[in-house]
Amino acid sequence: MAKRIDVKDLNIYYGKFHAVDGVTLSVPPRSVTAFIGPSGCGKSTVLRSLNRMHEVIPGARVEGDVLLDGQNIYASAVDPVQVRRTIGMVFQRPNPFPTMSIRDNVVAGLKLAGVRNKSQLDEVAERALRGANLWNEVKDRLNRPGGGLSGGQQQRLCIARAIAVRPDVLLMDEPCSALDPISTLAIEDLITELKKDYTIVIVTHNMQQAARVSDQTAFFNLAGVGQPGRLVEIDDTEKIFSNPTQKATEDYISGRFG
Amino acid sequence: MSESSATPTPAGASVDSGNTGVGGRVPSADTTPEGPISAQPVTGNKTKVRPGDRIFRGLTTGSGVLVVVLIGLIGLFLLVQAIPSIGLDQVNFLTSREWSTNDPANLRFGILDLLLVTVATSVVALVIAMPVSLGIALFLTQYAPPKLARPFAYAVDLLAAVPSIIFGLWGLYVLAPQLAPIASWLNDTLGFIPIFADGNVSSEIGGTIFTAGVVLGIMLLPIITSLTREVFQRTPVAQIEGALALGATRWEVIRTTVLPFGKAGYISASMLGLGRALGETIALTIILLAPSTTFGGSIFDGGATFASKIASASSEFNDPRSVGAYITAGLVLFLLTFLVNFAGRAIVSGKKEYR
């Protein structure tokens, strides 16, 4: 299941704009890696290039390799749809499908993959909702629309939707930035649990969050205005937050950014 | 006028007017249609009302009222003209299929046949226009490369600018002969179904409901397409990305996000198109052949719609009593399009609450 990710010399472009320059990093399986850095430094862009979501924007393209257990997901024979089925993603704003029930939201990915067996779908829905710590809250209203849940519940529904297909990797793009502190705590606990089974990469603006949930932390920064974003350093979270190698990292985490 | 009421209170009121000027004008701008609120600052505090505001409000209110008054007057005109004729009608106005107005002393007219032909033509048009428009809208918003989508959308919109008389001529002289083999094939193979049965006019000439419906369908394409396209374009990116991230193909993205999101807009666009189809006049007047028998339920029948019947008779309007018969038909058409447009809007606003 959980696979390791190796990014090698990744350059990312929006049309002619060079957004991210030469990122190389590794994410071991069954761990949480946090991407931190100021806005616009390209951390979300890097995340989105890990499951080939970057290229859905017109003009966007990627150079370099992203290896999933040694297999390059940017190899020409690889189908991006297949990549996205094995690398799940959770977005900044909860985005359950508004016209679908809670249950149908959770099993949407399986239905796309062609699973039609009702009892199997029910079983997966329960497993995924339990996995997302949402089962007890919604088990009596599985057929109600997913849009009726609270923001935090919706985000856990989206996590359930992502893990229902048993992906190899789970990408999270600021999953708590639209949530209140209690819902945030619920998601963070969930991330710690999910780590047992999945390789997780999370983008966050909240450094405390990065410190709480992640095993290793990558700090991204801009070389300057109009310059591409780049990876400053990646290391064990404890080391990044106590004794970073780069001065820019220290300035950023201590709030003396600039 | 406002100047004269402001001048007697010079220095003392200037501070006051400065305060209430802001406090009084801003909310009154929010609630312009409310009479009492807008009047209050003028009478109560002698706030300075600038002539520009007053003129502009008068103009906008006037334009708004004008539309409502016009619609009301048109309805009133139709009613006033129609009621005496209904009184003179020798047959049942709603259920009769006769239409003879040559002798004003013996008016025999009923709208049933016109209603059926009108609805049949519009339904044929919608059956053709709805799926094709959906296809065009999906192509333009989901499949076409942006460089192609823009000129293509422009071309579709241009279709709406073609005068309907052109569509009528083209339909009769170019399209109808091309459609004749299709019509006879449909008639031969599916003739056992009543709507494809033998019609009451020659299908070779093509003056059938089928031909008229196809032409009308083409005329509806730009109307339905442009509205549907706009709705589809507004599908939230978060939804689309959510589906993509689950490993949805392009068609699956459309099925799970774009279509559910745009369904209400598409249906209401089609209803607006239907409203247009019901009232289309000149193209149908040119194309449709009037047979001696009544509408028999086949799309290969000829006939006349409300609008084409009125248009083709307009040169012979001489007696007000006969004219009244046609105005009655116009009144029914007026109500019918009203109803369809209303239904279209109701569907849209109903769906909004659901989201």
Image: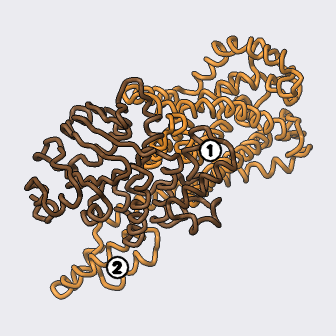
Chain colours: A brown, B orange
Instruction: Name which quarter of the figure residue B22 lies in.
Output: bottom left
Neighbour tally class for label 2: few under 14, some 14-19, many 20 plus, Cα within 10 Å: some
Side of B223 relative to B108 (left or right) = left
Side of A92 relative to A233 (left or right) = right
Residue B148 image position (x, y, % from top left): 40, 25
Residue A251 image position (x, y, % from top left): 10, 60
| Mark nearer the viewer, 2 or 1 | 1
Q: Amino acid at mark 2?
A: Val
Q: Earlier in the sequence, mark 2 or mark 1?
A: 2
For the N terminus of chain B, the image quarter is: bottom left
Tell me what residue is drawn at x 53 percent, y 64 percent: A134
Q: Secondary structure at mark 2?
A: helix
Tell me what residue is drawn at x 40 percent, y 75 percent: B38
Residue in front for this viewpoint, B212 or A79: A79
Disc marking residue B267: 1
Mark 2 chain: B
Residue B170 image position (x, y, % from top left): 61, 17
Instruction: Name which quarter of the figure residue A24 lies in.
Output: top left
Residue in front for this viewpoint, A82 or B267: A82
| Visible residue check, residue B318 | no
Residue in front for this viewpoint, B13 or A57: A57
Q: Amino acid at mark 1?
A: Ile
Tell me what residue is drawn at x 34 percent, y 56 percent: A174
For the C terminus of chain B, the image quarter is: bottom right
Q: CA distance from mark 2 to mark 1?
A: 47 Å
- Circle 2 is placed at which residue position? B42
| Visible residue check, residue B125 | yes
Residue B65 image position (x, y, % from top left): 51, 59
A248 vs A42: above or below: below
Q: Secondary structure at mark 1?
A: helix
